[in-house]
Amino acid sequence: MRIISGTLRGRRLAGPKGLDVRPTAGPVKEALFNILADQVSGTYFLDLFAGTGNVGIEALSRGARQTTFVESNQAVARLLRANLEHCLLARQADVQVMPVSKFLARKPEPAYDLVFLDPPYHTQDAEQVLPFLGRDGIIRAGSLVVVEHFYKSSLGDRIGYLTLVKMYRYGDTCLSVYRSVHPPAQEKTPA
């Protein structure tokens, strides 16, 4: 794995030798950042099911202000931290070693501008996590949430406060792009 663009272009990252991790493939990662285009710079980026940090580190290389990585596997999180140290990005990163559901239940601060999640294929993790993202100020109004998933997995057009913008297919992999349309934290209650 290597960083495709930005300040760390060409930098190699350590891979998951013997670990049960499926890093985002280079062409899919490149497509993801083509979709996000110039929206990455200056953002708070959230990388859920982060694995080795491949995507979140790419976001930092392309100018994200900070990336929060959430990974539940201790051994994989050690590899992620080693990749951050190798890229001299530890100060711009927050690594949370816990299940994604536990992290989201904490109502993390600050609110995120961009979210990427790549849950294990053939699980219901995306369907369980997505409804939480539009709640409690986890993401800002208008934020983008991108889900990497197996092409046969069908996600809804509307999940909680997220609306599907577009789905892109790359072989067996799909990227479903959602936009936050009305987080409850910004709702006004009648007096």
Image: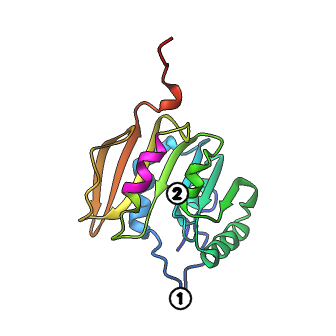
Q: Secondary structure at mark 2?
A: helix
Magenta part mainly helix, strand or loop? helix
Residues in magenta, as a range: 127-134
The answer, for residue 113, to whether it is visible in the render is yes
- Would you place residue 64 above or below residue 22 in this image? above
Q: Which residue is mark 2?
A: 101
How is this picture coloured?
rainbow
Task: Give yes or no for contact between labels 2 and 1 (Cβ–Cβ under 8 Å).
Answer: no
Identify the amino acid type marked 2: Ser
Q: Quadrant of residue 129?
A: bottom left
For the point 65% across and 41% down, the residue is 110
Task: Inspect the magenta stretch and tell me whether residue 133 lies in it.
Answer: yes
Which of disc 1 and disc 2 is earlier in sequence? 1
CA gap, disc 2 and disc 1: 26 Å
Q: Nearer the viewer, residue 129 or 177?
A: 129
- Would you place residue 66 above or below residue 135 in this image? below
